[in-house]
Amino acid sequence: MTSTAKPAIVVGIDDSEASFYALEWTLDHFFVPSAPNPPFDLYIVHSKPVPAFSTGFGIPGVDMLSHVDTDLKSIAARVIEKARELCISKSVKGATLETVEGDARNVLLDAVERHHATILAVGSHGHGSIKRAVLGSVSDYVSHHAHCTVMIVKKPKAKHEGGHH
């Protein structure tokens, strides 16, 4: 008997609060705690920047690149560990956690293709319009280019305490 492949969800994460909110939201809404057979295959993907972007500040005799790469590796390890702990706390088993080197936009689009994802979930960093114009928004980019449903998870704005004036 052949089992049909389950639909896949790819969640893009980085070291921001916004991306972990998106992961938590996805776990809460798509995965029933401790269900023996979750309805989706879950791939959690962290894009680790390529340290080559940080060259150009060469000091003779000092290998800046290896220091930068060590930092990026430790950030990546921390991000993946935090994601793993979140899955465990939500009793979600069988998630695949990946760190892929490269630009987040390309890494996420590649992950969608590789895993034949039905849904790509990303957080919204809520950058101001100027920063977004300069950096380009990853969520904006993938929403236009991914060949699947893109879910941009936004953290609700904190409501101010007390009455409104």
Image: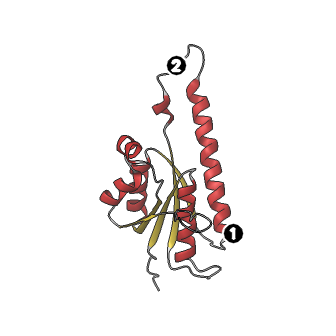
Residue 140 versus residue 81: which sits nearer the camera?
140
Residue lying at 52% horizontally and 19% vertically, measured from the top left: 58
Q: Position of residue 147 (x, y in %)?
A: 32, 64
What is the image's colouring? secondary structure
* Residue position marked by numbered label 2 in the rendering: 58
Above or below for 4 versus 100: below
Q: Quadrant of residue 113?
A: bottom left
The residue depicted at 59 percent of the width and 22 percent of the height is: 63
Task: Give the residue at x 46% y 54%.
Answer: 126
Q: Measured from the top left, where is residue 92 in percent x and y?
A: 62, 72
- Comes first in the chain, label 2 or label 1: 2
Local crowd size for mark 1, using a 10 Å CA cut-off: few (<14), some (14–19), many (≥20): few
Q: What count of labels does the image hold?
A: 2
What label does residue 152 carry, if any? none
Question: Height in image: 90 above or below 142?
Answer: below
Mark 1 secondary-structure assignment: helix
- The residue that mark 1 highlights is 89
Residue 61 in which image quadrant: top right
Q: Residue furthest front?
A: 165
* Residue at position x 49%, y 41% in the image: 49
Where is residue 73 drawn, in percent x and y?
60, 42
Q: Secondary structure at mark 2?
A: loop
Q: Amino acid at mark 2?
A: Gly
